[in-house]
Image (cartoon, rainbow, N blue to C red):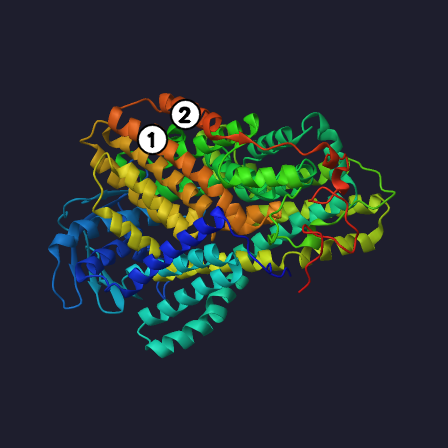
Amino acid sequence: MISPPAAVATGPGRRGSLACSALLLALAAWLALWPAGSEPERDALACSEAYRALLRVGRDEERSLGQRVLDRAEAAPSPGGAARLALGQVRYRDPLGRPGPELEPALRRSLVQGLRSAAGSRAGPAGAGRARAPAVEIAGERAAVPGGHGFELERSARALRLTWRPPTGPAQTLELPWTAPERRSLLPPLIAIALALATRRPIPSLFGGVLIGSILVRARAGAAPLDAVLEGGHGVFTHYLWDKLAAPEQQRIVVFVVLMLAMVGNLTLNGGIQGLVERLKFLARGPRSAQITTYLLGLLIFFDDYANTLLVGSTMRPLTDRFKVAREKLAYLVDSTSAPVAGLSLFSTWIAFEVSTFSAQLPAAGLSSDQGYGVFVQTLPYRFYSWFTLALMGWLVITGRDFGPMLAAERRARRLGQVLRPGATPMVAAHGTAMRMPPGVRPAAWRALVPIAAFLAVTLFEIARRGGAFQASLSELLSLQGISAVLTGNNGNAPLMIGSAAGFGLAMLGTLSAGLGARAVLLSAWTTLRSMGVALAILYLSWSIGSCCEDLGTAPYLALWAEGLLEPLLLPLVLFLLASLIAFATGTSWGTMSILLPLVVGLAFELGEGSALGGIGLMLVSLGAVLEGAIFGDHCSPVSDTTVLSSIASAADHLDHVRTQLPYAFTAQAAALGCGYLPVLFLGASPALCLGAGCAALLALVLLLGRTAEPTPPSQASAGGLGASPQGRRQQPSQGGEQGRERRP
């Protein structure tokens, strides 16, 4: 474990962090003291919850209510194979039993969205060579159809009751516990982020956010104040942390991270990394070319953001340390190539999730649900934040310029040889990055290339296998629909875990072939595990605070808050900012997409029918805005798992990474708004023209504001290679670590 620094540096950056934390704490106090939401607000939230209620599986049921409704609709299939369903009367009643006819259009819209999502999931995971779930054609989206399926939603103090009345047969009722989200649902992320900025101690800060969230959850359930505090404190460990420890998907991510870092440790020990660096000499001969190489490698690993982050960061860290590139800069390059590249790539796990999330709603825009992949391709010109993030990084590494806190970090690294800030707490402990190639071992690039190639090959093979690629015909695989089916198969994180296990196994064989023996292999793996204590604690706490936000309804509350701002041409801007807020608060880009994407298609198409862009045009821009806002908020959030993984892969101080990345993220955001969405929406500009203008504006900004870091003085520019410490001088083994000594617990 790494002990916290004894003293915290002061300066303009520190004062800025304190000012931000004070502002966030003041906002948190206002939210805590402000009265709870109004009854109309709760009614509107209840209607939006009908969407998720249709996807819930009852206690004594095997299928969700929405799937059971669609089962009754299959008796009258259309010629295209889609089921027809007529929607009759829908009614809403408040806790006093009073009807709310003014809310029935919102309730009807929420029910339609839920039924379409249910149709997309009824046949199980899609895949090439496997039958897709039939779509559904819904009559009565705006007005009741006589003799159609009726629904009634009743809200009580602590529950929602959704009753389905089919045209024939008895009514069915689903009752689920529910309490309307309030402004206080924003407190956990605000408090966690404010404390982290003020103290620079992420673990107690995140724990404080989870604790506040757990207490609020108990208070919403009706517990007395003292009981809420006691039960909330107990629930942090028994519910939130334990649920994430026991969750299979989280376990797979942790195993993947540990195996990847253990693989890199073995590659360092057996001379594979040193051999790879020797082969890269023609590409990386200094700080600038080392950054360009890292940037290009980040562009090449396009199929998954986790794989990109861990592979690029951990393998390039020795090279960037050699040329005195700040760990903050490496973390930025790793973090800001991972999600944008995976989000823009035509073949990635991101596309699988994105397409599967909104494709079921495409019939609301007059399109088939099978056209999801094609619609995604059409959104690419409107993915301004990702394009401009990649362009900004390109200009920065090509010109060798930086600005803001990143410039100070780069100058520190270049002048003093300190790739970490004095007093920094890297996410991987000192002994985890201090492994060196023992004397007598000859560097060999194949010892690194073979495990890395095996990791990539096995991961892609598992994605293809689980997506049904080997059961599909060649014509299916060559079509957009077939590619989409493979990518939308139920892969989860298992391919990454299996691929990393294969890479780690071959890395161990490479270590044995170097004559180091089994003891060196086991020692390397144990060193990796010991160095991960702080990192894994932060990762689990970030997941836990996301669970708190889900229980408190943070995202639905923010979505409702923005509904009053939805004007046709303002819709993409509102969605972009809303997705940014949700992702920043909850720390999850995928969670943000799952909340907003199903709501966008029908709403944007309906609002856009009377606008200059048209229904389809506004839908494409709005989908792109949601996807981009989710990535931007994820980049800015210290509670994001991808941000944490970038700090782990780079062995950087987590909060230093967030602090130095923020100005660049906001710069790309400003370009996305000023050079992208605003000209497209209000001037009718071509997206290609906007992309070109934005890239030119970013280049001008880098040349105007950016400055180069001073080169390392000749006395410090020794060719010490990978044996040099992060400070640019050799350390005795007993000293170890980034700060010249190993910090002991």
Residue corresponding to mark 2 = 697
- Label 2 Cα neighbours within 10 Å, binned few <14 / some 14-19 / many ≥20: some
The disc, 2 or 1, on the residue closer to the chain's N-terminal end is 1
- Choose top left, top right, bottom left or bottom right for residue 625: top left
Residue at x-position 39% and y-position 36%: 669
Which of these two is toward me, 67 or 355?
Answer: 355
**Image spot of residue 618 (x, y percent):** 27, 32
- Give the amino acid at mark 1: Gly
The quadrant the C terminus occupies is bottom right
Q: Picture coordinates of residue 546 (x, y %)?
A: 43, 57
> Looking at the picture, how far across and down is residue 490, in whole percent?
49, 47
Percent from the top left, x then y, of residue 260? 65, 47
Taking the spot 54% from the left edge, 63% from the top edge, the residue there is 245
Q: Is residue 330 left or right of residue 132?
A: right
Residue matched to label 1: 674
Return the mark for residue 570: none
Front residue of this view, candidates 696 and 147: 696
